[in-house]
Structure formats: C-alpha cells, structure tokens
Image (cartoon, helix red, strand yellow):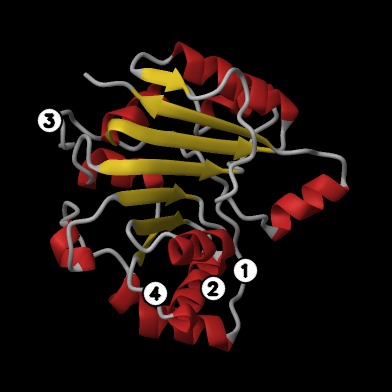
Amino acid sequence: MGLNGTMTSPATRTYNARRGRMGSGRVDATVRLLPRFGLPGGPLDREVVFGRHAPVVLEIGSGMGEATVAMAAADPGRDYIGVEVYTAGLANLLRLVETAGLANVRTHHGDAIALLRDRLEPASLDAIHVFFPDPWPKMRHRKRRLIETARVSLLVGRLRPGGVLHCATDDAEYAADMLAVLVATPGLANVHSGFAPRPAYRPDTRYELRGRRAGRPSRDLVFRRLPA
C-alpha cells in the first residue's frame, strides 16, 4: 500500500540504469558512508534522518553529486536528499558530502517514484529538483518520461503549498513537452511566463557544459504549488 492507501505495483521505469565496474575508492565510499548518509527504511522522519525539523529538498537524479553538494553547502537552512540509481554517481556523492563535511545531505539509491509514492508524506517537501532527466527521445519510450501527467501529479502532492518544482533540460523537444505538462497540471502555477531565467542557485554540471558546447542550451522551468 502507498501512503495514500492505494495499492502499489511495479511501475514503468523512468530511468535507464547504467552498469559498470566501480573502482576500489568508490566501493569503499559506498560501504563506509551509505550507512551514515543513506536514508533509513520506512517513512521519512526528518528528526531521525537529519536531527532537526527543516525544509527538505528532493533532488531526483543527483548524477555525480557536484550540483547537489554545491546547492546544499550554499543553503544550510534546508536539508537535501539526493536520489540516484547510478551506483558510481551515488558513491561520488557520498565522497563529496564527506569531504565537504555537510550535515544537511542524505542519499537514496533507487527509484525516486517509489520513494515519493511509498515513503514520503503528502506536502512534506519544500522543493523538488529534476535536472536533466532522461528525455527518452524515441516515441515508443515516451511513457518512461519522468515529467508526464501522472508522475507530475505525484510530485505536486508531495510538495507543501508554496513549494517549488524546478526542472531543467537541454533537450528542446522535451522542454516544450515539460512546459505543456506543467502548465496543464492542476495545483501548479508558473513562476515565470514560459521558461524561467536560469536561477543563480543551480550550478553548472559537466553534463550541462558538454551539452552547451554541443549547441544544446539548457531551459529551466520553475513552478509553485498553489494553496489547497
């Protein structure tokens, strides 16, 4: 059963998990640091997880972790959860958190949709970041996109009133579809007219810089959950 009392079942996967061998340093980081910085099982209890009651930001697809750590370091008043399915990315995030000495970052290795559906309470998040999700460009794969109507409704339900959903992509076609989906989602309001100016708090990543050099500019979308 999900937190809303609905039956849960295996869902269409929104990510393409990469496989590969990890070096000994990343293996060591995962073994040492995941018990310390990983989310415990069960519903999220921020007092247990972070030792305080502060606003929580969920980062879906934290990649190699550089952006997550930079934002958390610059924003000590909020707590960050980086969700990543890529094991090497998770290991790198753990190492960066340890090196930076951050107390406001935790990690989750697995499917963000299952985490949202089964373990996060409604209206429990201050913000959700979805930066550069897989665009699934082939038409037959479009059902796997993270930003689509049913999944966005779940995201919105986990945001507090006034909470922010911030998406970014360098895929022009996906950006247009994202905008259309978010504009049509009940309970969301666009903070800007159309795409948003790039917020200063979102750092560049190596992936984004490669896309920019290849002629793929990024587009940001910033939407706010309306009061009930």
Distance between mark 3 and mark 1 Cα atoms: 37 Å
Residue 177 position, x and y percent, is 61, 20
Give the number of the mark in front: 3 or 1: 3
Distance between mark 2 and mark 3 Cα atoms: 36 Å
Residue at image location 71% in from the left, 24% down from the top = 173
- Residue 217 found in image quarter: top right
The residue identified by callout 2 is: 92
In which quadrant is the C terminus drawn?
top left
**SS for dot 3:** loop
The residue identified by callout 1 is: 20
Residue 184 position, x and y percent, is 46, 11
Give the number of the mark in front: 4 or 1: 4
Residue at image location 43% in from the left, 81% down from the top = 98
**Left-right relation of 81 to 180:** left
- Number of marks in the rendered image: 4
**SS for dot 2:** helix
**Left-right relation of 32 to 4:** right
* Residue type, label 2: Asn
**Left-right relation of 106 to 180:** left
Distance between mark 2 and mark 1 Cα atoms: 14 Å
Marker disc for residue 102 = 4
Distance between mark 3 and mark 4 Cα atoms: 35 Å
* Residue type, label 3: Gly
Viewer-side residue, 91 vs 53:
53
* Residue type, label 1: Gly
Marker disc for residue 5 = 3
- The earlier-in-sequence mark between 3 and 4 is 3
Q: Is residue 64 visible?
A: no
Circle 4 Cα neighbour tier, 10 Å, few/some/many (<14 / 14–19 / ≥20): some
